[in-house]
Image: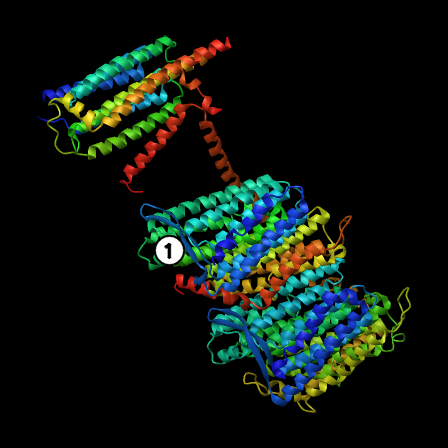
Amino acid sequence: MLENAWLIPLFPLLSFILLIFFGKQWREKCSYVGIGFTGISFVLSVIVLFTQMANGSGGAEAAWLTIGSIEFRFGVIVNPLNALMLVIVSLVSFLVHIYSKGYMHDDTRMATFYSYLGLFTFAMLALVISPNLLQLYIFWELVGVGSFLLIGFYFYKEEAKAAAKRAFIMTRIGDIGLLIGMILLFWQVGSLEFNEIFTAVRDGSVAEGLLTLIAILIFIGAVGKSGQFPLHTWLPDAMEGPTPVSALIHAATMVAAGVYLVATLFPVFEASPAAMTVVAVTGGFTAIFAATIGLVQKDIKRVLAYSTVSQLGYMMMALGAAGYVAGVFHLMTHAFFKALLFLAAGSVIHAVHTQNIEKMGGLWKKMHITGPVFLIGALAISGVPLFSGFFSKDEILLATWYDGRYGLFILGLIAAFFTAIYMFRLFFMVFAGESRTTGTKVHESPRSMTYPMITLAILAIFSGYINTPWFGTFLGDWLVGDSEFLPFEHHEGPIWVMLAASLVAFAGIGLAYLIYYKKALQRDFLTSHMPNTYTLVFNKYFIDEFYQYTIEYGVRAVSYLGSFIEKYIVEVIVAAVTGVVKSVGSLGSRLQSGQVQTYGAVAFVGLAILVFLVVWTGGYL
Amino acid sequence: MSGELFAFLVLALLAILGGILMLNLTKVIHMLLSLVLTFLAIAGLYVMLSAEFVAIAQVLIYSGAVTIIMIFGIMLTRHNDEQKTRGNLTRNIIVGAGIVLFFFTMYFSINQVSFGDQATSLHVENTKQIGVELYSKYVIPFELMSVVLLVALVGAIILAKRDDEEEAEHK
Amino acid sequence: MSAIPVNAYLLLALVLFCIGLFGALTKKNTVIVLISIELMLNAVNINLVAFSKYGINPGITGQIFSLFTITVAAAEAAVGLAILIALYRNRSTVQIDEMNTMKH
Amino acid sequence: MDWLTILVFSPLIGILILSIQQAEQKVTISLTGILATVLPLLLSLVVYAQFHGGGDLAISHQWISFGNGIFQIDYELGVDGFSLLLLLLTTIVSTLSASVAAAQIKQGLKAYFLWFLILEIGMLGVFTAENLILFFIFFEITLVPMFFLIGRWGFVEREKAAYSFLIYNGLGSAVLLILFAAIFAKTGTTNIEELKTIMGSGNAVSEEFRFGSLLALLIAFGVKLPIVPLHTWMVRVHVHAPIAVVMIHAGILLKIGAYGLINFGIGIFGDQFVKVAPFIAVLGLINLLYGAFLAFVQNELKSVFAYSSVSHMGIVLLGVAAMNEAGIQGAIFQTLSHGLIAALLFLLVGVIYERTHTTKLRSLGGLAKGMPLAAGFLLAAGLASLGLPGMSGFVSEFMAFLGLFESMPWLAAIGTIGIIMTAVYILRAVLGVTYGKTVKSFAGMYDLTRREMIPAAALLALIVLIGVYPNFITHTLQYALESIMLGIGG
């Protein structure tokens, strides 16, 4: 079965191709095509997962590109991490396909939407089963395109166009890092197969300085894809896409690809302490940085987007702190509860037709399913005990603690505190209090939307139990189990870490409750007391503006310099060339005066010069 | 200095003098006459080169016939013409420079050459030798040359005549 | 016989050739241009005759060739003069720089 | 059978048939014109089928000979893998271009096709010629028809464009002629294979001569490629020539520069090429970045794509300068891939121009609403152009950079800025045209017709085919690459 795992991505691809060609005729039936094919992929993924558990890893490969003696290959490899990712991706994608049927039901371009979803799912599934770095890079870019197309789905909106463009270019900047790292690695190792890379790294055949450089370059790729600081700005803007897309791509799967990349290449990173520090610090900083921005945003999707950035930072921090299992574990739980939150947010938007949380409120009574599932998601992400997020977050904090990075540990705690605040700020403002909606009557979403949410809610509660300090570390054992390259140490952490994490979560929730529900504290406390700080945070630390004034204008300046050169130097040279040709021409035509003597004179002088040259050079030219 | 060398120098200087006079005189008829001097000097050189027959032909044809034809030409056209201007000065300078270049190039080459001994038997019955060669070895070129002369004669007559008739028709 | 070197004759011929050439290319009067060309032919003749006496392969041939040249030169002078007169009839000038029909 | 001669001169049949037709019968003429390009297409497929590594298709006849064989030039045709692929590219793009021309050229269709078919003979000949003199003759044959095709059927400044085309390429080919004459004088042969052995042996011809020859080649083909700062004629041609001609020009004629550089530059003067490789790499880098940055500020769709061609040719130079298998194969791939992509891009520009009568970026926008298919194709072509994996552009860029990183990592690292910039300017142009608000609504807007769709789809299919399974081509290329690598001692 494992060698036929390549079939899994092909079904969504088939869906993409069919819908591109026949989508127009099929109209609403498109959704069934998409759902059906993704469903098959999901079923196959589950089969692959269990086969892997039973029989161990496996895969298949074939030649793809031959350059003389170099051969690049294409194929599949199924190891625990890949199998897990397959299931996560295909499951979330399947649920989002179903959800979209309800969410997009009145859109005329549903066929296009489903075909793009198919393309993305194909690329993402193929990404996670890549046996070598080149193939990973190829699908890495393709998921970027899927994301780009879906962000720009409402192509007639200027914001969507700008967001799509920005997403593509920002991630491409990261991709170039990955490309350079990959090529450098290739010339060191002579192959891009993961196993050979790991062997070479373990045997120490790559110099450590170079390895650090390579690891950091590859990490830049992950930074771009996962919206880490400083390449994070595209991710909040990407919320211009339809909400199911935000759930699938910009919460659960594609953005997690950066984390997946670091996890896959973990042995390479591990060999370079400097690179590990870079990963951990970037992750930790992003976690708290994005969380602060999330505190003050007013757009429901943007809050969730910054939350995503923050959580991804968390995962990076875990990986950087050698918490391989913790990172992957949090990747999984996050995929479920963040997809859930986005889908619930989509459901809310679907009902009230706005994204501004100040215009929502009191929806708890009106949306009997969306409300509770959103609450479950919020509890999970805040790290309230017994929900999935609690276990994975705890694992991360433990990993940082044991890695000796106490600063990061504290950073993680603060970020967790902020997470709880902004999630419950969101919850209270949307679902509690008085209704501030205007106009349309609010109603619960159709079943095609609620069922996926319920499924995810169940997973958001229970998926944490596969790796707990109490019931056994099944996930960790399995992930690291049969790999010769991955270290595994589970930390039987001091109980106070767990207590601290819970405490922080409850404190955050409590604070939010006081401010936004009880109104016991002034809401505009921050605004009035620290106006400068508030402006700074509300404007996302002016990073966008900074980029605009430095990079964008810089590029423009270089371009205008280029066109200046073109206009006043190159064109002048050209004019000079044409001028010379013209003047030679006019000189020639002036010689054609009709006077035989002139002709004779020219001919003779030419002859004299020739003869002179022949004699001068001694008869040889 | 041997007498031969002296004769050569005198004749050479005369020839060059004629040429320079030709370039610098202003009246056309004077230019022409100065060239007669050159032609005669060249005839003298031919004698020194054991080519008596050629020398005589030179005197007859160049100093006589060609010069007379040219004088006729001048008389039939505007014989009082003087050289109006020095003409196009830049062109003259360019041509002059080219000629100087050419001169020195050739001078350089001439200085490089050296040949074997001189022939001795040329002056013995010079005219007979030429006649024998012309009528045996070079008989075909010789006959062709007569055709050329004939064609030139007829052509000259026709060229000079045709316009008369055309002018008559015009009138 | 103390020989005058062939180079002397060649040099003289070169000088005359250059004078003739300069005249042919710069003089305005057509008659002088024609006679300058005659001068150039004469310079060539000097070479022919000189080589017939001093050349690598001395012999009478050089003199015969110079005779041919003289003949052709004479024919050329005759035809040239005829053309000149015909032109003069049409244009009333013998200035060579006014003859530019080749331009059109 | 002498398939190559038949292939090269097969457009003559079309010329003969066209010349006896009446100029008024537009339908028959356009049909004949298209069919006349289909014939070489079929023949080139025959040649492809008969190709087994090289030598068996080569032919040689005595052609010009005097001086008891001292001066002898033979009529020699032959193909290796590289030129075979370029032949296929030529016939394919020619057929597509002819079908575009049949729809878009409004007047003088007969004369257009006559020139066009002569042009095709020239292009086919250039890629099959096995000696320098024959190559030069075919090279010149491409110039004259192009001059008239641009000058008569182009847009506003067509005559200026035609003249600058002629002046630049004329200078280039003059350099080429002098060089070929010098080579012939020195070695007494113009056969490329013989020259490879003579020049390769190292002692037959002085090193200075070989170095000078290489520089001359660089200038001659640098004009064609084009290398900055010799590129302005090419931008002008791209903007002002008729779309169908630009397809040919960007798709094939520019490739003659790359072909010459690889086949002659490396093939014949390999050991000298190693010396100038860093210099060429710098030139390539300048091309790549200069083209990209300038493309970013153009206000006109066609000039964006023109500068994009400059930029993409920079990658060819970079790949060549890498002087290893990956780099050179990347350059070859880029040559082919850019041929297809540029043809597709300009095809779509033509489609847009036909509907809107403008290519100004400012007055275009939101076209995806009125013509979703065309917008989709444009987007796909743009993505291919910026090197999206799964399309041919990625494979070539990847290989070129893979090669360059081995030999000159720092230059390569700077060059990657070009990859980012490509994304920036392509998205700016393509999204500006198709996405966003509709700036102006154009009357009578309609989507791709079937006649436009088939060429576009064919090109896109080829682009994707190469991108998805590049080994499809590498087998054909193998022998050519080996002989090139032999030239540089690798």
Q: Where on the picture, by quarter, is residue A90?
A: bottom right
- In the image, residue D102 lies at what x, y percent? 65, 49
- What colour scheme governs how the chains and residues are painted in the rendered image of this protein? rainbow
Quadrant including the N terminus of chain A: bottom right
**Residue D167 shows up from this direction:** yes
Residue at x-position 66% and y-position 75%? A9
Q: Residue at x 42, y 45 (%)?
A: D177
Vertical relation: A472 (above or below) A314: below
Is C17 left or right of B90, judged from the image as shown? left
Given the image, on which type of amino acid does mark 1 rest? Leu
Horizontal side, residue D433 vs residue C20: left or right: right
Query: Residue D265: where, in percent of width, then height?
Result: 43, 55
- The quarter of the rendered structure image containing the C terminus of chain A is top left
Taking depth in this image into account, of A42 and D241 the one nearest to the observer is D241
Q: Quadrant of residue D155?
A: top right
Q: Residues within 10 Å of mark 1 (few under 14, many from 20)?
A: many
The spot of residue C7 in percent (x, y) is 18, 29
Residue B59 in the image: above or below residue A50 = above
- Rendered location of residue B22, percent (x, y): 29, 16
* Quadrant housing residue A564: top right
Please name the residue that numbered disc 1 is placed on. D195
Which residue occupies the foreground of this view, A366 or D477?
Answer: D477
Left or right: residue B148 versus residue A149 is left
- The residue nearer to you, when weighing C7 against B138, is B138
Secondary structure beneath dot 1 equals: helix
Residue most extreme to the bottom: A471
Q: Report whether residue C34 is seen.
A: no
State whether residue A172 is above or below residue A446. above
For mark 1, name the chain. Answer: D
